Amino acid sequence: MENELAISVRGLRKAYGDNVAVASVDLDVHRGEVFALLGPNGAGKTTTVEILEGYRQRDAGEVRVLGADPAHPDAGWRSRVGIVLQGTGEFDELTVSEVVRHFSGFYPEADDPDKVVERVGLGAKAKARTHTLSGGQKRRLDVALGIIGRPELLFLDEPTTGFDPEARREFWELIRDLSAAGTTIVLTTHYLDEAEALADRVGVIAAGRVIEVAPPNALGNRQESLATVSWRTPDGTLASAETATPTALVYDLAARFGGEVPGLTVTRPTLEDVYLRMIGHS
Amino acid sequence: MTTTTKPAAPVTAATAARRPGSGALALRQGRLEITQFLRSRESVVFTMGFPIIMILIFAAIFSDEIAPGVSYTQYFITGMIATGLMTVSFQNLGIWIPIERDRGVLKRYRGTPMPKWVWFAGKVIMVVVIGIAETVLLLAVSVAMFDLDLPQTTAKWLTFAWVSVLGVTACTLCGIAISSLARTARSGSAVVTPVALVLQFISGVFFVFTSLPTWMQQVAAIFPLKWMCQGLRSVFLPDSFGAREPGGSFELGTVALVLSAWCVIGLVLCLTTFRWTTKRDG
């Protein structure tokens, strides 16, 4: 075992001409963790991930992925890293099973192709030409190709874009399975509920910098934020108050109403509220 | 949840079969390319059918003899074989590689442990197999319908073989090289088709070469197609026809030299300019 870090990044920088895509990124991803990279379009998510995947060269910074520098990927390193890219590379003339079987040949520790096709939910489509698949099904094929080599580290770039809610839930189960088996997972996503459902930790990236890394429920001091208590007054209007001690307030209200408080809700900022505030500030 | 309590990725030795050796990987890649080619109806019809359609038209137009006992078909078959070999290598690759690059197929291969050369080997195997099949088909049609005389001596068959191999190699490398000129999937055929068409006109595919203007013959002599045609004429025409060539003989030494030179030029261009991703992909 090399160390506890699957990924370690210090001072990563990448510019395209005058356009600085990644200004300075520091990042640690632990082995076995599910790490989500959140950020608006153009924040530098994909550039960062593609440098970690060995697709792009960086301008500056220290990067270690599974103990090696991804700027010089060798076959051994490639066989330990699974990649699900944002754009799909299609093999129109081939069937699902043919493509997965072919890619299994590239990996020394490849999984059984039929099992993987089944696992991503394409069992019924195994003999179908890939051009007949729906968008969501093509994405599952991408995932199948990403995990066929039984990677230690799996990158997923916006994996569920275009999925219907049911397909997303199934996909989340698959990610949890992989994680439970010990795979380290790095995913980028636009969906806050996805990050919240899957990630052990979330990194928020904006304007080419990581502005915070925390577990989803602690992001932006979410746990310590003021809670909003709202209720309906006897004349029927809505009242609300922000408080650091919501329990005390609810107790007061219960006493005042002599029992049930009409229309009572207690909320804290959602991940989305926190996230929007964070990227708005940057 | 803490991030370090999950089990490490299982390292089990008794997994699926070991990865095939590099040679076997190349053969698998070749088989995959051939399957994709044969399932694409346009490729089969236009690449394999084109020379046969052309020889049918030419035989119908020029049904008489170019010299006593030597039909025009005997002359034009050389141009059709050369054109067919160029179509399956230069045009086929120059058109398809930009499409695969644009779709992200090449990027996906780069993300696997597959050695880079295996991908190129797959293309070469596909070109060679399809090239042989198409040439055999063309010869069979010509023998059956137009009484084509096949080469009678081992020496001529050997010449046929080395001219074809050198020619296909040069055209394959140039096709891979020119594929990097196309910026999008669609522009591949716009780049390649005019080049191929002009070469066919000036290299003596559609006309008796020596009937072309001298300057045109000199321009054609820079490129491989003219030399492929000339080498094949030495195989399919009586030895006395050597005197009718611009150089007063079939100049097989020069044929070998020019085609080899184009192999070197093509290889250098491939190694220096080949792109696995599109420009916008960085």
Image: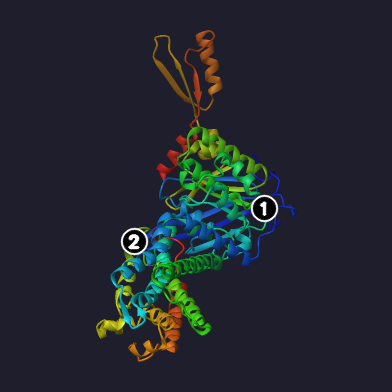
The quarter in which the N terminus of chain B is drawn is top right
Q: Is residue B256 visible?
A: yes
Provide the residue designation for mark 1.
Answer: A4
Foreground tag (1 vs 2)? 2
Farthest residue toward the front? Answer: B69
Is A229 in front, or is B165?
Answer: B165
Task: Please give left or right for residue A37 compared with residue B197 in the image.
Answer: right
**Residue drawn 50% across and 13% down?**
A261
Provide the residue designation for mark 2.
Answer: B187
Q: Is residue B192 visible?
A: no
Q: Amino acid at mark 1?
A: Glu
Q: Residues within 10 Å of mark 1 (few under 14, many from 20)?
A: some
Is B265 in front, or is A82?
Answer: B265
Q: Position of residue B208 (x, y in %)?
A: 30, 80
Is A271 in front, or is B78?
Answer: B78
Q: Position of residue A69 (x, y in %)?
A: 58, 63
